Every structure is written in structure tokens, then in C-alpha cells.
């Protein structure tokens, strides 16, 4: 039996960054369990966007801090390969007056929190993204400090920094069962043997509900499939991420020159299916050639899917699980875990160690489902 | 949506044989291929094939391609789409095909993947210079399009492909400076090697390319001797004034489509790389998906035709349309066993022993 | 660089047509791959690589490897080893990743 101070289940961005912050705060025996390789789940399958334009105050504050951290993360983690962080902006399209009014409210909130977003006219939008066909677009919101970050490099940067500080990363190691002993320690059976620790962090993404159920905990989350595709590379022609909540579509040209795009489709299956469909290719091609007609001839290279771990209010579920002392959870990100990880992981580490976090995350606590304090996030694709 | 009982990806020797075998059993078949004429790599093989009469031994590859294409034309149940690329295969048994700049959804009840093999590259400084060409590319350029690849060529690899291409270059009026081979022995048949020697082409065993030189294209190559650990021996360098370095250093199965489908794969060096686990009927771990030819493991044209025919019959049997399957299967297997017999088939036999498995489905 | 006489093969060619390479007129046969026509005219460097600006030619000649990407009639990333030659084509060496043809 191996003994650890904390075991983190899940080697995505969340597990690796929490491990880094715990190790940096002096926790000695930090173990990350990952069934496959790091970033193999939703992290490595996401759209790689990072933005501060949110519709609820806690998300705005978390993301403002995340982007501040990302600006200096290569230095902080001494990662020489680059994390691909590029601030080329996010452009939300409003297709109706009602939507524009919602954006105005969001921008007002964002500005009040020091986020430099703005309402833009279709004419401004043509200037920001000349490729955009603004037919039917009444306006939008834009923040030049939003952008793109490479999920693989960022996760690897956290994982390497954590291991340099003494954390242990167990890849290709599957959690088989977990029990809690009378003395209060968690005993985990894995494909590589048994490990025990007094603290367990559930950062298993789409599988977090399943991991919690091993301890008899019922998390109010479920997973759903989202599809995505990437094209061949061409020289840069599109700066911002384009988001149309109306079409359920997002598209951005990544720093390597390829276009990455996805759809929010309510008919996608719920559960753990990570397959993909040919219908998605037709649907997304049709929509994107209306919005960005010039990229119609660009060839599609690959498609895949990833799993959003959804919560009832489309907000993360973070913090201690009151019924099981020593158990913590960071899940339910509803498609935004990658971008929120830099700030959330730091706060999670502080909460686990009993410190007061710089960015408060108590509103994301599990107790909100008991108290009825849900706070619905409108700006989700 | 286009519907077919059987879709075959690839119109090389394996794919054509599979389509012909299936249609012989009365299966409606669509064959999709990214080339503009049927035959795959046969269309550039000007040499005569070995093997048995049933696999057209003694006939040149280009003529086998014509024979198979003729049979294809006479088979009303086979539809052939040229210049069409299979993009992916989905869980609802839809094969997505790019044709004339559009994506077409093709629903099929069974699928044969006969995507062939791709040429390997090799690591040395300057290996990306224009003029460093695959042996297949050299053949395509001169035997299909009638264009000389260069004036003077260095061949890397003395397996059958390296030796045959050297001879074909001489036929096309191109000079061959030398054939270099990393191993201590010539891998190809002695009959090909002695033909070259008679034409004064040196074959240097235990030698490899050290570096390619040139500004905008290959102008010169440095070759050196290598020891038992395949390490270059300083002081043994030889310079060749060549404008083409032709790499005949082996092939890898093209299995992208099989991987995308989710067929269980295994890395088998003897078969050239990742190949799908399958049963004795070429059926993969996905029951409606069959594999044939070099995509199932690199061998040569004759075995590609046989595994293709076997896969075609097996797919027909899977669709309930090959009552005589056991006999047809045994016939194909006997011919394959004969091709793979002896010392030259030892590597392939070793590879097959680990990849043909009952893990795959049964017909 | 064309093979004039061959002991085994005869080559059937399309009509002789004019096309443009870097703006200069060249001749080739209709329907042959653009790369074959260029090669016959002694042109082997087809593009320059995005990061280190290295010269690149074709490698596989059957559309698999993407070493031969050129700009053809304004469209980048065209595999000229399989793209068929037509009269009047405007063929250019691709520098880097290729510029998307954007309407004004």
C-alpha cells in the first residue's frame, strides 16, 4: 500500500494544475491518477478558447484572474516550449435586438469588474474580422484580451512543474474502486496497486459522477457529447474567436493557421459516447460558409468529440463534499474547464489546505443545489 | 444517400480482386479509389510477376491492371468511382467519400478496406531536398507519365523494389550511379541483382546515405560504410554526383481508415507497422469491416490479389451470398500458403502468427 | 526530361497546352499531373516550407504525403502530384502555409 497526502483523480488540466498548486504550497506526497495520458479527455478535445466575456459575475472574476495568470504562466511554470497563449479577441454575434440587449447587460457587468469588453456595430465587426459576413447580424460584443491557448502544452506545463516539485503523475493507471476507512482515509485500488490518502480530489471530468458514485456520493452532473473539427493550415486571416449563440457555432483560427470550429447541438447524446458523426460535418460546413464565406474551400482535416460535464445551471461544481470529509470535487464545468483551470486550481488548492483563496469560489459549492442558489450562465455554446 | 451492399476502398490489386470476388457472388459493390485509373500501383509495374499462373505470373503488372480493369468493366454489379477519396466511416455504416469536390454519404452493409501501403522515408541531413524521391514516385513519374526523374540517380535499398526500379531507370535512359544497402546482404532476388551487375551498376552493401547536398535541389550525395551496429564509419565516405536520391527503404501499411473506424490494431514490424487484428477470413474486430492487401500487412502484388479475393468472398458470405465459401476460402488459402512458403515468406508468416486472431469476429 | 523511346511502354498524352509557372509560360500535356509537367520542364522546387523556408519537391507522387503543395489559380495547398493540368493554369510556388483567396 502506497501512502500519499492527496490523490487527485484525473490528469486533465484541472488535476494537473491542482497538483501543481498543492505541491507549490508544500504538500509533499501529491499523486495524480490518470487512466490514459494527460489531457486525453475534455482538455485535449476542447476548442482551446479563453475568454472573460461571461454573463455572471463569478465567471467574469474567475476568467479575469485566469487570463492574468495565463499572461505569465510560461515564466511561472518555467515551460520553454510555449503554451500558445495568443490574445486575438473574442467576438460574439447578436442576431436579434433581444440578444444585443443581453450582450449590453453582460458588457456592463464585465466593465464594472474591470474587463475591457465593448459593444460593437456590424461595421466595427467587419474591421475586427474582415472575413465575417454580417448579414443578419445586428451587433455584437468584443474583448480584445480574450483569445486562444494550447490545451496540450498548458497541461504538460502544469504536470512537469508539479512533478519537479515532487508530485507523482501516474498515467495509464485506472481507478478501480475506492473506499473510506473508519480512520477516515481513502483507500484506492488501481490497475497499478493500492494507494491511500486522507484527501481525495475528484477532477475526473466527464467521469466525475461515476467516481463520486464509488463513494456513494450523488453529484448533480451529467455528461454530453460535443463535436468539433479542424481544417488545414493557411496564413492568418481571422483574428478573433467568432461565437454565434444563435447558430450554436464557434470558430477560430488557431496560431498554427488551422480553423477549429464546433457546434452546440441539443440532439447530441448524453453520456460517455465519444464517437462522431458525418452529419456534424455537413451541419457545421453549412453554417460556417454563411458566416465566413471565404473559408468555404478550406479542407477539413480531422473531426472528433469531447464530453462537457454539465451541471443544472451550467456552472462549475467546486469545493468540499460536506457528507464525506476529505473529499473535494472540481467538475461540472459545462464546457469551460480548460479556460477556468488557471484560477480555479489555485483556489481549490487553498481551500484544501484551509487557506483563504484569492479568488472566492464558494458560490460554486455543492450546497447551492440544496439551498436552491443556482445561478444560470447564459453565455454557453 | 447512396446505398450499396458492399463498399471497397481502393482499386489496387487487392481492392479490385475483392470487388470482383464479391460481385461473382451476386453482391452489389461500389469501389472507390483516389486514382484516375484502376489498378493502384500495378499501373507502374513494368516487370513480370512471379508466383503461380492464377495470380498472373509471367505477366507485367501494367497488363495485370488492364486485365483486372477489363473484368471490372464486364461486371455489371460493380460500380467504380475514380478520383474519389474515402474520408471516414461512421457508426451508422456510412462511408463518407469526396468526389468532384463534394462529400457523398454512402451507406454499406459491409466494407473492404484495401488502401495499400505508403513509402517510408529515411533520416539524413538534406533528406527534404527536392530530388529525394520515393521509389514509387520515381516509377509513377517515368512509367506512368513518361518523365525522367533526373539524369543520374542514387538508389537506396537493394530489396526487390530498389533493384527493379534501378533496372527500369536504365530502360528509361537514366543513369544509375549506385545502389546502396544498409544490410550486409542484398535483400532482393539474385536474378534482379545480377541483371544490374551485368550493366555495371555497383551494389554497395553495408553502406548508407550520410548526407544529401544541394541548394534548391539534390546536386550530390555522400555515402558511407556502416558497421554491425549501423553506425557510419568515418573515413569511408564516397561522393556521388547525382540529381536524384531514390528511397526504396520499405513500405508501411496505410491504415488510417481502419484506425478511424476503431478496428483493433497491433504493431507488427514484420508486416510493416500497425495492422488490424483479423481472423482467417480477413474480418477485423468490427464485424462488417474486412481488410485486404498491403493494408493488412506489406507483402506483394500476388498476395494482395489473393487476400483481396478472400476478403471479397468473406464479405459476400457475411452478407449471406456465398454458399460455397468454405471451398473458395480453402482455395485462396492454399495459394497464399504456397506464396508464403520457404525462407522468403518467413517474415510474413511470423507477422501473421501474431495478428490473425480469434479476437476478430467470425463469419 | 521526357522519355522519347522506351523498350516496353508507350505513353498516351493529352493535347499540348500552355500554362504559367510563376507568371512565365510553359508547355505541358493536358490531364497529366501539374508536377509531371513542371518536372519535365526541369522544375523540381515546388514550394518553401513554413518554418525554415526549405525548398520542397514531391515525395510520393500519388497524393499521400502533401510535400508538393502549390498555389494553383489562387488556391493554396493544392497537391500538384495528382492535380491535372489544364490550359492556362496559373501555378505558383507556395511560401509558408499559403494565403487564402479572400474576396474584397
Image (spheres, coloured by chain):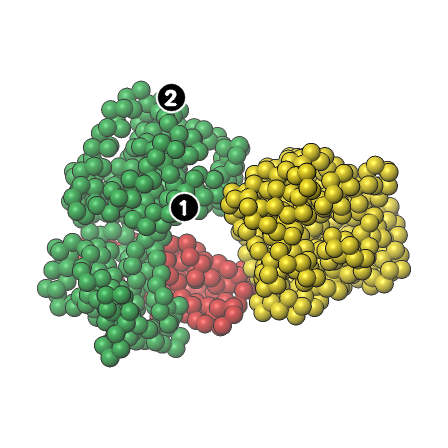
Chain colours: A yellow, B green, C red
Q: Is residue B342 above or below residue B142?
A: above
* Residue B320 - label: 2
Q: Is residue B215 above or below residue B251?
A: below
Q: Secondary structure at mark 1?
A: loop
Residue A95 percent coordinates (x, y): 80, 48
Which residue lies most toward the left here?
B198
Name the residue nearer the viewer: A372 or B190. A372
Residue C102 percent coordinates (x, y): 63, 61
Residue C33 percent coordinates (x, y): 39, 57
Res A308 quadrant in image: top right
Residue at image position (40%, 68%) is B128
Q: Are marks 1 and 2 on the same chain?
A: yes
Is residue B147 rendered to the left or right of residue A106?
left
User: Is there any visible trace of residue A20 in the rendered image?
Assistant: no
Which residue lies most toward the top here?
B323
Residue at image position (76%, 38%) is A323
For the residue carrying disc 1, how many other residues have a C-alpha within 10 Å: few (<14), some (14-19), or many (20+)?
many
Q: Is residue A67 above or below residue A352?
A: below
Q: Secondary structure at mark 2?
A: loop
Mark 1 = which residue?
B255
Res B139 quadrant in image: bottom left
User: Is there any visible trace of residue A6 in the rendered image?
Assistant: yes
Residue at image position (67%, 66%) is A73
The alpha-carbon separation of the residues under discs 1 and 2 comes to 27 Å
Name the residue nearer the viewer: B3 or C17. B3
Residue A316 percent coordinates (x, y): 75, 46
Amino acid at each position: 500500500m502506497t501512502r500519499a497526502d492527496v490523490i487527485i483523480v484525473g490528469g486533465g488540466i484541472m488535476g494537473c494544475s491542482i497538483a501543481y498548486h498543492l505541491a507549490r504550497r508544500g504538500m509533499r506526497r501529491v499523486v495524480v491518477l490518470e487512466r490514459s495520458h494527460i489531457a486525453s479527455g475534455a482538455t485535449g478535445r476542447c476548442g482551446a478558447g479563453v475568454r472573460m466575456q461571461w454573463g455572471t459575475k463569478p465567471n467574469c472574476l474567475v476568467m479575469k484572474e485566469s487570463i492574468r495568470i495565463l499572461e505569465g504562466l510560461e515564466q511561472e511554470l518555467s515551460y520553454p516550449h510555449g503554451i500558445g497563449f495568443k490574445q486575438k479577441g473574442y467576438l460574439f454575434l447578436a442576431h436579434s435586438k433581444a440578444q444585443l440587449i443581453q450582450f449590453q447587460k453582460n458588457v456592463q457587468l464585465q466593465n464594472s469588474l474591470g474587463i475591457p469588453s465593448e459593444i460593437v456595430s456590424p461595421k466595427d465587426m467587419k474591421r475586427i474580422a474582415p472575413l465575417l459576413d454580417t448579414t443578419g447580424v445586428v451587433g455584437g460584443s468584443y474583448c480584445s484580451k480574450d483569445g486562444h491557448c494550447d490545451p496540450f502544452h498548458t497541461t504538460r506545463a502544469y504536470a512537469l512543474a508539479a512533478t519537479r516539485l515532487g508530485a507523482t503523475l501516474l498515467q495509464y493507471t485506472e481507478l478501480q474502486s475506492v473506499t473510506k476507512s473508519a480512520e477516515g482515509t481513502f483507500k484506492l485500488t488501481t490497475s497499478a496497486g493500492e494507494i491511500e490518502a486522507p484527501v481525495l480530489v475528484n477532477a475526473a471530468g466527464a467521469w466525475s459522477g461515476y467516481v463520486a458514485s464509488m463513494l456513494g456520493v450523488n453529484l448533480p452532473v451529467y455528461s454530453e457529447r460535443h463535436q468539433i473539427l479542424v481544417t488545414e493550415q493557411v496564413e492568418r486571416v481571422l483574428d478573433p474567436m467568432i461565437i454565434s449563440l444563435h447558430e450554436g457555432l464557434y470558430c477560430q483560427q488557431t496560431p498554427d493557421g488551422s480553423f477549429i470550429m464546433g457546434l452546440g447541438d441539443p440532439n447530441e447524446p448524453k453520456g460517455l459516447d465519444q464517437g462522431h458523426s458525418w452529419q456534424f460535418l455537413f451541419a457545421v460546413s453549412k453554417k460556417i460558409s454563411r458566416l465566413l464565406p471565404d473559408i468555404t474551400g478550406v479542407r477539413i482535416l480531422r473531426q472528433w468529440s469531447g464530453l462537457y460535464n454539465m451541471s443544472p445551471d451550467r456552472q462549475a461544481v467546486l469545493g468540499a463534499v460536506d457528507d464525506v470529509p476529505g473529499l473535494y470535487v472540481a467538475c461540472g464545468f459545462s464546457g469551460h474547464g480548460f479556460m477556468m483551470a488557471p484560477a480555479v486550481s489555485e483556489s481549490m488548492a487553498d481551500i484544501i489546505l484551509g487557506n483563504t483563496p484569492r479568488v472566492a469560489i464558494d458560490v460554486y459549492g455543492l450546497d447551492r443545489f440544496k439551498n436552491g442558489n443556482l445561478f444560470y450562465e447564459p453565455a454557453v455554446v | 444517400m447512396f446505398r450499396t451492399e458492399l463498399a471497397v476502398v481502393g482499386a489496387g490489386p487487392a481492392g479490385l480482386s475483392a470487388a470482383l470476388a464479391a460481385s461473382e457472388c451476386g453482391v452489389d459493390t461500389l469501389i472507390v479509389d483516389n486514382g484516375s485509373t484502376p489498378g493502384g500501383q500495378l499501373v507502374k509495374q513494368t516487370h513480370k510477376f512471379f508466383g503461380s499462373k492464377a495470380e498472373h505470373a509471367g505477366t507485367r503488372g501494367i497488363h495485370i491492371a488492364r486485365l483486372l480493369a477489363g473484368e471490372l468493366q464486364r461486371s455489371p454489379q460493380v460500380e467504380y468511382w475514380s478520383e474519389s477519396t474515402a474520408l471516414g466511416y461512421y457508426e451508422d455504416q456510412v462511408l463518407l467519400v469526396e468526389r468532384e469536390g463534394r462529400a457523398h454519404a454512402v451507406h454499406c452493409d459491409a466494407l473492404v478496406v484495401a488502401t495499400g501501403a505508403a513509402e517510408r522515408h529515411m533520416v539524413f541531413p538534406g533528406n527534404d531536398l527536392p530530388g529525394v524521391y520515393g521509389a514509387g514516385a520515381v516509377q509513377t513519374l517515368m512509367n506512368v507519365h513518361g518523365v525522367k526523374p533526373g539524369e543520374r540517380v542514387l538508389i537506396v535499398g537493394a530489396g526487390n523494389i530498389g533493384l527493379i526500379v534501378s533496372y527500369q531507370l536504365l530502360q528509361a535512359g537514366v543513369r544509375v550511379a549506385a545502389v546502396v544497402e544498409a544490410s550486409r546482404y542484398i535483400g532482393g532476388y539474385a536474378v534482379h541483382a545480377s541483371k544490374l551487375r551485368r550493366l555495371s551498376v555497383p551494389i554497395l552493401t553495408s553502406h548508407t546515405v550520410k548526407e544529401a547536398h544541394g541548394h534548391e535541389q539534390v546536386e550530390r550525395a555522400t555515402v558511407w560504410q556502416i558497421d554491425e551496429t549501423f553506425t557510419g564509419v568515418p573515413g569511408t565516405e564516397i561522393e556521388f554526383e547525382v540529381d536524384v536520391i531514390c528511397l526504396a527503404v520499405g513500405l508501411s501499411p496505410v491504415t488510417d481508415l481502419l484506425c478511424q473506424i476503431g478496428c483493433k490494431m497491433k504493431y507488427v514490424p514484420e508486416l510493416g507497422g500497425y495492422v488490424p487484428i483479423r481472423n482467417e477470413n480477413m474480418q477485423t474486430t468490427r464485424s462488417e469491416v474486412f481488410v485486404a492487401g498491403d493494408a493488412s500487412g506489406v507483402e506483394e502484388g500476388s498476395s494482395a490479389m489473393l487476400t483481396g479475393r478472400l476478403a471479397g468472398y468473406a464479405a459476400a458470405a457475411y452478407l449471406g451470398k456465398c454458399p460455397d465459401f468454405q471451398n473458395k476460402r480453402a482455395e485462396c488459402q492454399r495459394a497464399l500458403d504456397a506464396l508464403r512458403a520457404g525462407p522468403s515468406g518467413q517474415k510474413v508468416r511470423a507477422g501473421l502468427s501474431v495478428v490473425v486472431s480469434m479476437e476478430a469476429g467470425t463469419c | 526530361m521526357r522519355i522519347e523511346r522506351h523498350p516496353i511502354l508507350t505513353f498516351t498524352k493529352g493535347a499540348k497546352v500552355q500554362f504559367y509557372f510563376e507568371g512565365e509560360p510553359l508547355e505541358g500535356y493536358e490531364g497529366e499531373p501539374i508536377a509531371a509537367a513542371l518536372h519535365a520542364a526541369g522544375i523540381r522546387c515546388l514550394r518553401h516550407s513554413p518554418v525554415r523556408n526549405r525548398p520542397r519537391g514531391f515525395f510520393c507522387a500519388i497524393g499521400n504525403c502533401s510535400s508538393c503543395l502549390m498555389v494553383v489559380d489562387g488556391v493554396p495547398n493544392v497537391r500538384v502530384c495528382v492535380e491535372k493540368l489544364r490550359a492556362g493554369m496559373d501555378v505558383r510556388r507556395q511560401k509558408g502555409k499559403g494565403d487564402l483567396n479572400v474576396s474584397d
